[in-house]
Structure formats: C-alpha cells, structure tokens
Amino acid sequence: MFRVCIFLGLLFGLLSNSRLASLYVLEGFNVWASRALPALFPFMVLSGLIIRLELAERVVKAFTPVLGRLYHASSTACYVMLTGFLCGFPMGARTIAELYERGRLSKRDGKWLLSFCNNLSPAYVMGVLFPMLGIKRVFPYLFGFYGIPLIYGWIVRRISLKRMIPEEVHSLPNTSPQDSSKRQTATSFGIALRESIESATYAVIILGGYLAFFCLLNLFPHLILRKPQPVVGLLLEVTTGLNAMEGRRTILCLCAATFGGLSCIAQTHAALSHTDLTDAMGEYVLHKMALTAISLAYYFTLFRFLGF
C-alpha cells in the first residue's frame, strides 16, 4: 500500500507540473545529445571492433609489461584499465561486460576491475569540470581522479591475491577453464562493424534514457522545497548537477564527480545486465563510496593545508 501511495504521489506531481517535468527531461536529453552521445559513441564502436576482432592484446602491448607485472593482470585486463580510464562512464563497465561475455575475462577479474575502472573521462574532467570550478593547477586534481583509483585498484588486487592459493595466483594471467568454454573467436570485419554499431547504438540510447529519467527526479525535491536543489541533483545525475552548482562548493563537486551519482550506478548496472556480474553491484557501490571518502580526505588536505 505504501508503494502505491508513493507511486500515485509521483504521478500526481508529474501531471500537475508537466511543464517543469518537461524542462528537466529536456535538460537530460540536452546533456546526452551535446556531451554523452558525441563523446561515447565513437569509443563504443571502436572498442567493440577491437574486442570482436581480438585486437585488445595488440592495442595494449606497450602497456602490458608494466601494468601486467604491477597488477598481476592479463593483457585483456590491461585493456579494460585503458578504456575505463580514458573513455569515461560507463565504458569501463561496458568493456568488462563485453570481454566477460566473450570469455576473454574471468568473473574474478571483472569484479576486481569494476572496483576502480569506471570513471569520468579526462576529456570531461579537464575540458569541462576544471574550467567550471576555476581550477588552474590541474595535476594535483588529476591525481585525485586517476592516481587514487589506480592505487586503490592495486591495493584491492594485493588483498585478493593474499586470499588465493598459490596455484590460483600463478594462473591469473590466463583465462580460467570456465571462461574458456564460452570463449568466442574473432569475426570478419564486416560482421564485427555491424555488431559494434548495433551494440553501441542500443547502449547510447539506453544511456540517454537514464540521463533523462534521473534528471526528471529533480522535479520532486524542487516541488517539496519550492526551489531547485543542486546538491540533490549532484547525487542523482552528476553532469547536470555540476552545471547547476555553477562552480560553487568545489570539494563537494569533486567528490560527487568521483562517485558519479545514482545515474552512473544505474548505467553501470545496465551495462552489466546481460551477464551475472550484476551480483557484484553491491561491491561496486561500496568501492565507489570508499573511493569518494578517500578523495574527500585528499581534496580537503589540498584545500585546507596545501593552499590549492
């Protein structure tokens, strides 16, 4: 009964404030069309081609000797790290899901990579976020966005290795027998291109739906408190929330960008929805909360004691 009452209340709010609701939805689709679509779609198609043509190991060949030894990871896992850090939400999760579905990545490695490889892209951070917040000295803040997750991922990996038996640790760079049974071979370029475009188109349309829906949810705190609530917007959908903050509360904005908002969590779940990696979503959220707490301490130190 309680859920029915909540649903009816939300429906009444939408019907009685349809113009304001439309503005929030339009804001979500504007962000999708102007930023998410042009930024993510090419990377989604290109990454899909690399995976389907079995080129991931060649792409990261230059990075594997360092990253593979440091993280005790396969070249496929190194490819996930590369795309997760360079391409932005939700490419890390999407790449993990595609490689796992094709038997190129074990579930254990997929869950580990989820803990730190799903972040805002450097293009957005340096091209939009830093200018918005008036940040001039970018390197300490870049370390907060990318150095801290890399160290965090290394610590999580060390902890997981200590819990394994020596035989499991020795076999980590290889695909496990369970994954080998479903491993798919490379396809022709034409088929790979078609599948990559179809998959990327579906994924980016779903992404637009999530952006619009979570922007719409800003309507209800707006109605209850009689004015827009930018802080709530940061929690719901980080991109539009950051726009609404207009450069205020820098530490809060930086930590919200690290967390990603509820929309990014939902997008991550959608990216994993065709696999059984969805059972790791609870761990993923906990890792995101831990990274956000560490980032809060780091940024507070920069502002309070180092004068940044």
Image (tube, rainbow, N blue to C red):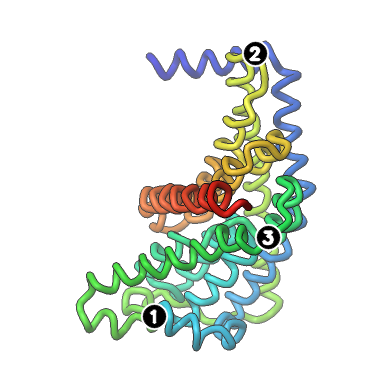
Label 2, secondary structure: give it: loop
Nearer-N-terminus badge (1/3)? 1
User: On the rendered image, what quadrant is the N terminus found in?
Assistant: top left
> Amino acid under label 1?
His
> Can residue 198 be seen?
no
**Rendered residue at 62%/15% (across/down):** 223
Q: Are marks 2 and 3 in contact (CB under 8 Å)?
A: no
Q: How far is mark 1 from mark 2, CA to CA?
A: 53 Å
Q: Which circle, 2 or 3, is nearer the viewer?
A: 3
Q: Quadrant of residue 79?
A: bottom right
Q: Which residue is mark 3?
A: 138
How many numbered tags mark residues here? 3
Q: Which residue is mark 1?
A: 72
Give the percent coordinates (x, y) of residue 299. 54, 50
> Amino acid under label 2?
Arg
In this view of the protein, which residue sits in the foreground, 223 or 146?
146
Q: Which residue is mark 2?
A: 226
> Amino acid under label 3?
Val
Give the percent coordinates (x, y) of residue 113. 44, 65
